[in-house]
């Protein structure tokens, strides 16, 4: 099929713009400055490179990735979003090409009406795909399942598409290649989807096994704690009887001074016993998610062993989180680890966890006593920074990594004299 030069250049330009339409649709959290860089600088560069070479779309993907991710840290989610966007562009273009192959006349010179009709059909298909992607939360799926394997599979499909396009142009056999390319890419896509699904199932089982092991470990701690409490209660009951006998003897002799002294001793002894056991696991009864409950029980045990007062409040039943449970457990675990470590070196030695949810959000509020030294949350969140000797300092930095992974996670820190507060909001 022969197309006039100007309409052909127009189609090439709009085809590149369609890539950014797809990318902006899949990744709505792109700033205006990032869009300006991609459209004003890299779109023209890609256009001119395409005039003289066959692999201009490599620049399209690479430039988009570095504009969105920067140069400091590898972001697999961003890489997958950019490669997926160019693959969707290929899919829509290929679909329109197949339709054209079967319905259009091949021996006539094509001009603007034909090209505009092609572009309109491709745009309609892109908008339909973006609408379907939004309905099925494809962006969230990409964020949750971006792994080394998924990146490798997407890049493999991208390179295969580039090589097939190069072969078609090199041999100038578009009419023979178009149906074969379509069938081959469909088979490749099905194969990649199958490999990804199996890998995801294995990874999910691995995470579930890890959480199950953690849950069993928490159950063992809980059982050991009950046994210790039962033993301590038996000792306390024995001592309590002896103290009561002493009180009876003092009362029988009408020695008021000795009686008051023994009453004060009994009060102090009782207060100390109950103070050391002033929290229990019943505070978790509204946490209906077994993974979250086992995590909280484990941290209660750690705090109890270090004689840290740990208070848990959950007024409403909490069953699920609006993000994958693996990252939810990891997020809350980091918060509680940081809180317990900070409280252990403070004077008050207190930690308070509030779990709250309504129709719009789930909230974690962690308050802990800490040293009086004020530090900015920006400094605390730097990877490798820590106020504790020999500590990796990756706690808040890991929280930031999870926050960047999901658009519905919001974290706020506040430090006052002797108290550090972390508020995490998970939007539903």
Image (cartoon, rainbow, N blue to C red):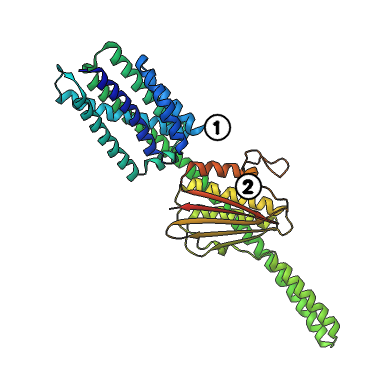
- Quarter of the image for residue 226 reads bottom right
Q: Secondary structure at mark 1?
A: loop
In front here: 53 or 371? 53
CA–CA distance between discs 2 and 1? 20 Å
To which residue does mark 2 refer?
A: 377
Q: Name above or below for residue 388 compared with residue 292.
A: above
Image check: 179 left or right of 264?
left
Please tell me which residue is depicted at 30% across the width and 25% down the height of the picture. 185
Q: Position of residue 31 (x, y in %)?
A: 46, 39
Of all residues, the one furthest to the top in this rendering is 171
In front here: 216 or 330? 330
Mark earlier in primary sequence (2, 1): 1
Q: Position of residue 375 (x, y in %)?
A: 68, 48
Q: Residues within 10 Å of mark 2 (few under 14, many from 20)?
A: some
- Quarter of the image for residue 135 reads top left
Image quarter in which the N terminus is found: top left
Q: Position of residue 98 (x, y in %)?
A: 21, 25
Question: Which mark is in front, 2 or 1?
Answer: 2
Please tell me which residue is depicted at 15% across the width and 24% down the height of the picture. 104
To which residue does mark 1 refer?
A: 73
Q: Is residue 303 visible?
A: yes
Please tell me which residue is depicted at 63% across the width and 47% down the height of the picture. 377
In front here: 51 or 243? 51
């Amino acid at each position: 099929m022969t197309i006039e030069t100007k309409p052909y250049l127009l189609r090439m330009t709009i085809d590149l713009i369609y890539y950014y339409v797809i990318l902006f649709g899949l990744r709505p959290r792109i700033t205006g400055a990032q869009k300006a860089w991609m459209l004003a600088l890299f779109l023209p560069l890609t256009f001119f490179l395409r005039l003289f070479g066959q692999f201009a779309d490599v620049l399209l993907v690479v430039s988009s990735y570095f504009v969105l991710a920067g140069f400091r840290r590898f972001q697999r989610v961003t890489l997958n979003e950019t490669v997926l966007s160019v693959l969707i562009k290929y899919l829509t273009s290929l679909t329109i090409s197949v339709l054209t192959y079967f319905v259009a006349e091949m021996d006539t010179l094509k001009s603007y009406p034909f090209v505009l009709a092609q572009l309109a059909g491709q745009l309609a298909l892109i908008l339909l795909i973006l609408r379907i992607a939004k309905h099925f939360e494809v962006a969230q799926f990409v964020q949750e399942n971006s792994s080394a394997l998924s990146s490798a599979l997407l890049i493999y499909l991208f390179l295969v598409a580039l090589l097939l396009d190069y072969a078609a142009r090199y041999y100038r056999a578009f009419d023979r290649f178009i149906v074969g390319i379509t069938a081959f890419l469909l088979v490749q896509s099905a194969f990649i989807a199958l490999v990804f699904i199996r890998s995801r199932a294995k990874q999910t089982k691995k995470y579930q096994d890890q959480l199950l092991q953690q849950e069993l470990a928490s159950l063992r701690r809980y059982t050991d704690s009950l046994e210790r409490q039962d033993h301590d209660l038996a000792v306390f009951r024995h001592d309590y009887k002896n103290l009561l006998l002493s009180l009876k003897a003092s009362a029988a002799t009408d020695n008021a001074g000795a009686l008051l002294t023994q009453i004060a001793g009994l009060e102090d002894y009782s207060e100390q016993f109950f103070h050391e056991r002033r929290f229990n696991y019943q505070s978790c009864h509204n946490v209906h998610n077994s993974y979250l409950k086992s995590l909280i029980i484990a941290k209660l045990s750690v705090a109890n062993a270090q004689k840290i007062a740990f208070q848990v409040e959950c007024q409403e039943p909490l069953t699920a989180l609006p993000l994958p449970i693996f990252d939810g457990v990891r997020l809350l675990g980091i918060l509680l680890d940081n809180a317990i470590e900070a409280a252990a070196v403070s004077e008050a030695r207190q930690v308070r966890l509030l779990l709250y949810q309504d129709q719009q959000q789930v909230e974690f509020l962690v308050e802990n006593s800490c040293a009086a030294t004020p530090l900015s949350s920006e400094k605390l969140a730097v990877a490798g920074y820590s106020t504790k000797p020999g500590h990796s300092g990756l706690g808040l930095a890991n929280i930031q990594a999870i926050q960047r992974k999901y658009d519905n996670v919001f974290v706020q820190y506040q430090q006052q004299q002797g108290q550090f507060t972390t508020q995490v909001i998970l939007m539903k």
